Image: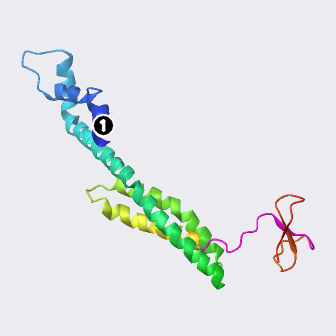
Amino acid sequence: MADRAYRVLFEMTRLVDIIDWLARPPHAEESGLRVRLHRLYQPIGEFILAALQITQVFALRVAILMLATPVFLLFGTVALVDGLVRRDLRRWGGGRERSSVYHWSKRSALPLLVRAWVVYLALPFSLHPSWVILPFATLFALCIAITANSFKKYLLIKASCSRCNYHCIMAGHGLRMGGPGSKVESN
């Protein structure tokens, strides 16, 4: 991807050829537009080359991050399974629910993905991607595991008691699930 971006941005637009043409000093008898452009290019030539190299590094880092996306997917899948198993154990073991932990972890999962991209793209020095991606992927997996673990124990969607018209899970009361007329008995 980085090589393709270089070809599209610099070679297909002939920007590399223009920079090479401007960088070569003109002959002594030469005059005209090329001489004037060379004079303009001379003080800022190093900055233009630095901008080209920064663009190449940025494209390379974006390609690395795109190729690292399956790591987040893999870590997230393992964490989701682990969290759902822990939720099931908590549900059948009579554990306590903490909704604040659930909401905190749910809100922090997506910003961790964005922060991984921002941190790696903004680094002003060269660093192996594993030192940035793996800690953020681990934190992302931790958030997913906590979110799945602290999910509600019981889900009652539009359930109301047929005897007392309240949301009720008492034994012997009939529960109506869904719309009017649909009745499911729970004993």
As displayed, is residue 135 above or below residue 171? above
Tag 1, which secondary structure?
helix
Name the residue rendered at 86%, 65% in the picture: 183
| Residue 41 point in image, percent of width and height | 21, 30
Whether residue 163 appears in magenta in the rendering, the answer is yes
* Among the 4 quarters of the image, the one containing residue 72: bottom left
The residue labelled by disc 1 is: 4
As displayed, is residue 91 above or below residue 64? below
Q: Is residue 80 left or right of residue 91?
A: left
Extent of the magenta region: 150-164
Name the residue rendered at 49%, 68% in the picture: 79
As displayed, is residue 25 above or below residue 53? above
Name the residue rendered at 61%, 76% in the picture: 88
Tell me if I can see residue 143 in this picture.
no
Assess disc 1: are there few (<14), some (14-19) or many (≥20) residues with their C-alpha within 10 Å of its C-alpha: few
Whether residue 19 appears in magenta in the rendering, the answer is no
Tell me if I can see residue 3 in this picture.
yes
As displayed, is residue 15 above or below residue 180? above
Q: Which kind of residue does numbered mark 1 sit on?
A: Arg
Q: Is residue 171 left or right of residue 119?
A: right
- Of 140 and 104, nearer the camera is 140
User: Of helix, strand and loop, which mostly describes the magenta segment?
Assistant: loop
| Residue 1 point in image, percent of width and height | 32, 42
Q: Is residue 27 left or right of residue 15?
A: left
| Residue 101 point in image, percent of width and height | 59, 74
* Among the 4 quarters of the image, the one containing residue 122: bottom left
